[in-house]
Image (cartoon, rainbow, N blue to C red):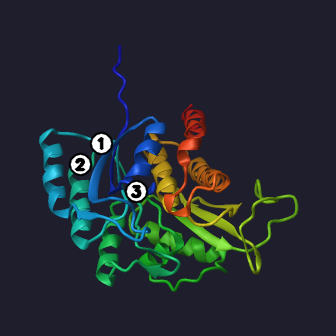
Amino acid sequence: MTQYRQKKIAMINDLSGYGRCSLTVALPILSAMRMQCCPVPTSILSNHTGFPVYFFDDYTEKMEAYLEKWKELNLDFDGIATGFLGSGEQIHIVSSMIKSFRGEETRVIVDPIMGDHGKPYATYTPDMCREMEKLVRLADVVTPNVTEACILTGRAYKGEGWSRNELKKMALEIQKMGPGAVVITGVSSREKARMGAAPAGAAAELSTEENGPVYLTNVLLEPDGKLTFQKSAKTGGERPGTGDVFSSIIAGAAVQGWDMKAAVRLAARFVKECIQKSDELKVPVEDGVCFEELLPELVLACRRMGK
């Protein structure tokens, strides 16, 4: 009898004890996708930094010793995924890890978390952004939001008004850096859907601003050059951890070898449903999304994709 070999993915990110983000999102999401999630903590926090106070312990000095034991055990992984990295040194350590543990079939997924809303995070200097670009070059799949895509390609950010041609050029530039697949997330617009083609659920609970309903587009550029724009109505407000939910599903799908177009659709739909459920249950925004309520649905969706 052939022994079942469960997929394993090394997930590099921080660990926040409270607030549903980073590793506490990736572990259950990837488990629901029927793979073993092996965490590599970059820091330990009592709760995420969106709260007024928090405990923080930088794990940089311990990461190499941690990974050295994995080397001594000759461990191998089907996937290596990266989340927020807090320093240039951490980026170097992760780059070295990828080179050490990457096998012929290993899939590397990089979420180049550097900024949002048109600005880099306070910790991300121009030098760190350049180091992140080097990490992106090692990826098979990269999942920047539109701000991070602008940082990687040296473009000026604009909140709305992106043309498909502009997004295509940006995705192609990132792909030329090395990744096979590029997913640019969260491109915002207020373009009205064509008659009869409104996204599911658009009639109710639309997120609106003074100029009307807001739509979000995810741009997928596949290794064969095929480009897809997936647009859906935005519902609810922003919550911590939604990007971690999205990127964890993409990472799991990439390691499982699933169709990326279907994976992006699943990730976007699941995040949207989690936001809706969290709003319905009046979960405080700082607590993130209560994805636990919908994990059974994710399990069923992944079973269908895996057939």
Q: Which residue is mark 2?
A: 101
Amino acid at pointer 3: Ser
Q: Earlier in the sequence, mark 2 or mark 3?
A: 3
Query: Where does residue 118 sit, x and y in percent of width and height?
Result: 51, 81
User: Residue 22, labelled with which disc?
Assistant: 3
Tell me where residue 221 appears, x and y as whole percent.
Answer: 54, 61
SS category of the residue bearing label 1: loop
Q: Earlier in the sequence, mark 2 or mark 1?
A: 1
Under circle 2, the secondary element is: helix
Residue displayed at 21% across by 60% down: 59
**For the residues marked 2 and 3, what is the alpha-carbon distance in whole angstroms?**
22 Å
Q: Quadrant of the C terminus?
A: top right
Q: What kind of residue is marked 1?
A: Phe
Do we see residue 105 in this rendering?
no
Task: Give the residue pinned by disc 1.
Answer: 77
Badge 3: residue crowd in 10 Å (few <14, some 14–19, many ≥20): many
In whole angstroms, how far apart are the C-alphas of marks 2 and 1?
Answer: 7 Å
Q: Is residue 92 above or below residue 34?
A: below
